[in-house]
Amino acid sequence: MTSRTLVMGVVNVTPDSFSDGGQWFETDVAIAHGRTLLDQGADIIDVGGESTRPGAERISEAEELQRVMPVARAMIDTGVPVSVDTMRAAVAETALDAGVSIINDVYGGMADPGLAAAVAGRDCRYIVSHWRGHSDVMNARAVYTDVTAQVRTELAERVSELLDGGLRPQQVVIDPGLGFAKNAPHNWRLLADLQELMHMGYPVLIGASRKRFLGQLLAEAGAESSPGFRDRATAAVSALAAAQGVWAVRVHDVAGSVDAIRVAQAWREAEDER
């Protein structure tokens, strides 16, 4: 790991992801894609087997393991840090036993109360995302009076509960959960207030990649741009987030964000030399 912002490359082993429509669903194809992301400069590979797009239906634990573990094991064999995107304790335990070094839980341990215990005492990072409900209800819960203050308070409460459950502070990474129970103005406010989140004292992960609020920003003639046309905007977010000093960005297009972060890092270093 380095002092610069890290790039986490996404490998969705799903048939229904909003971002790539199941392009990497087959195991061999997903593994090849992960290796391509490494060649492009990814510092971490994040493997997920369950879609979290709005309205997505849950899959079984057995199905999730069948999708995720062959790809995760292949990525572990490359020597790169591997993250598994899961909300299930059993999947986290299996992944950690196999050598995964990060558990990325978009539901912050709230979907499975056993997840904190599964991660506690392990030599791994645990990414705790802000969450207000599963994919089928989260849009209805995007109601805030002060989104930054409320997300910060709710994240702090969740982290405190996880620490009481045995998680160690050095394991914690926080994620404001852009797009999860948040509309476009909420997402932009959270990005503008990144320093307030970083002042919580934990590394911060930003996952803006290809999300709907970028498609709305780039809309033409009232139609949102499709996910695959949001990568340049994603790279811009990566550069701005890196300039703020976030721990990592989670992206689908690794090459663009690697370059963007190099620019942001050079800029920060020049400012430090003043």
Image (cartoon, rainbow, N blue to C red):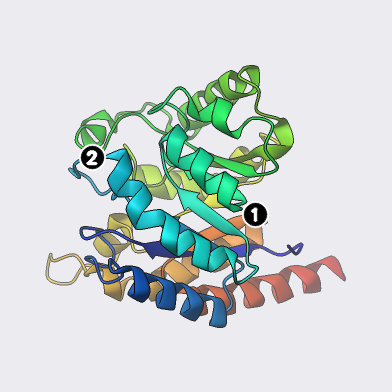
Helix, strand or loop under label 2: loop
Give the answer, above or below, for where 181 lies relative to 1. Answer: above
Q: Mark 2 points at which residue?
A: 58
Q: Would you say residue 184 is visible in this rendering? A: no
* Amino acid beneath label 2: Arg
Whole-angstrom CA distance, mark 2 to mark 1, is 30 Å
Sequence-wise first label, 2 or 1: 2
Residue at x 58%, y 45% (from the top left corner): 97
Q: Mark 1 points at which residue?
A: 247
Residue 80, quarter of picture: bottom right
Residue at x 62%, y 51% (from the top left corner): 101
* Amino acid beneath label 1: Trp
Between 22 and 210, the one nearer to me in the picture: 22
- Pinpoint residue 127: horizontal percent, then vertical percent: 55, 42
Quadrant (top left/top right/bottom left/bottom right) for the N terminus: bottom right
Residue at x 71%, y 32% (from the top left corner): 169
